[in-house]
Image (cartoon, rainbow, N blue to C red):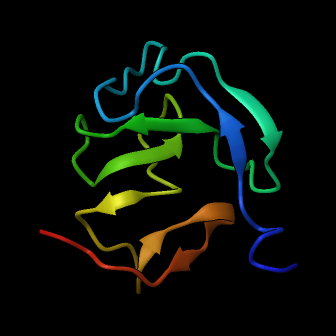
Amino acid sequence: MTELENTNEWKQSSNPAIRTNNLSGGGVEGYESINTPNSGYNWAGLENNEVYGRSVMDGSVDTEWWWYAVGSTYQYGTGIPGPVGGTHQGIVTS
């Protein structure tokens, strides 16, 4: 699988920079998959993760998980949580 084939493409109407993760539902609104080969770990778009503070955003919608992390502030294993339960190298901020 090439890097492009391993990339999620989707639409969503909510802005993950301002919409806060809410375990009772509603981390992402208007999600529509276009091409999402990585859909495990509750992938359903990007949501704000300020409630848990491990990243700025994540793609594990309506859970405490933070797979598909964006702006990680916490290290997971040897990197940051990416798609399909793997860790990926990236910059971790504190």
Instruction: Say which quadrant the C terminus sits in.
Output: bottom left
Residue 59 horizontal/vertical position (percent): 53, 44
Tell me if 30 is positioned left or right of 69 in this view: right
Q: Is residue 93 above or below residue 41?
A: below
Q: Quadrant of residue 24?
A: top left
Tell me if 47 is positioned left or right of 2 in this view: left
Instruction: Say which quadrant the N terminus sits in.
Output: bottom right
Q: In the image, what residue occupies the spot 42% across and 72% down? A: 80
Q: Nearer the viewer, residue 52 or 89?
A: 89
Looking at the image, the residue that sits furthest to the right is: 1
Residue 25 horizontal/vertical position (percent): 49, 14
Residue 49 horizontal/vertical position (percent): 32, 40
Q: Disc count in the image?
A: 0
Q: Quadrant of residue 34?
A: top right
Looking at the image, the residue that sits furthest to the left is: 94
Q: In the image, what residue occupies the spot 44% across and 47% down? A: 58
Residue 30 horizontal/vertical position (percent): 62, 16
Q: Is residue 66 above or below residue 86?
A: above
Q: Is residue 6 above or below residue 41?
A: below
Q: Nearer the viewer, residue 77 or 50?
A: 50
Q: In the image, what residue occupies the spot 44% across and 57% down? A: 69
Q: Nearer the viewer, residue 62 or 6?
A: 6
Q: In the image, what residue occupies the spot 27% across and 54% down? A: 54
